[in-house]
Amino acid sequence: MGKRTQKDIRRSVEALSRVEQAIPDGDAAIHRDAATLSDGQTRPVLITNPADSGVDAYVSQRIDTDNQITGTVRQNVTVDTAGTAVDKLNTDIQDSQLDSTQVVVEQGGSYSGGDANQLPIQTSGVQGQRSTPFVATAQYVIRPGANLLYDITSQANSNDFVIEFAVAERER
């Protein structure tokens, strides 16, 4: 993997800033997937900004596990079989526009392809000891028609796992 360029760093800061600004305003949605994984079990979680959305999606993500996980992040995969949508809440609890969010987060589907460059994921932790939550150092901007696939693999039995995305959408 190559070094991060200044443009990459600016884009990450911009994404995080947009999410941080949107949450207090109630202009963001929180998507969360939770499961208990067995040793060696992989759970795919896909975040997609539909091609016709008309928005840029600014995404921040958090992963928390009881024990160690490994995995990868790939972009622009092909959806072979759609998964199940994960739970979401708008950050403005009184807002009735929750269903108007464009970005979709699903788990459990079947995916192939994607860009050759993959980002590794790994949390610390050993059997029986809660790991330190993994917080991304890079946030993402997902343009219309793009997606990110997280393939999360447990390295322990009965491994409670949570992945959460804060997503702010801005019209293009």
Image (cartoon, grey):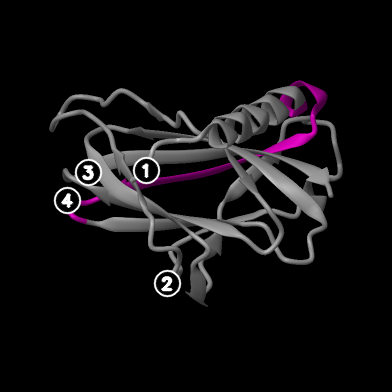
What is the distance, in whole Å, between disc 1 and disc 3 at their CAs?
Answer: 36 Å
Q: Quadrant for residue 161, please give it.
A: top left
Compared with residue 89, is residue 147 higher up or lower down, i.e. above or below? Answer: below
For mark 4, what is the residue? 39
**Which label was assigned to residue 158?**
3
Q: Name which of mark 1 and mark 2 comes first in the sequence.
A: 1
Q: Secondary structure at mark 1?
A: loop
What is the distance, in whole Å, between disc 4 and disc 1 at their CAs?
Answer: 31 Å
* Residue depicted at x 46% and y 68%: 109
For mark 2, what is the residue? 113
Q: Are marks 4 and 2 in contact (CB under 8 Å)?
A: no
Q: Name which of mark 1 and mark 3 comes first in the sequence.
A: 1
Disc nearest the viewer among 3 and 2:
2
Disc nearest the viewer among 4 and 3:
4
* Residue depicted at x 45% and y 32%: 136
What is the distance, in whole Å, between disc 1 and disc 2 at their CAs?
Answer: 21 Å
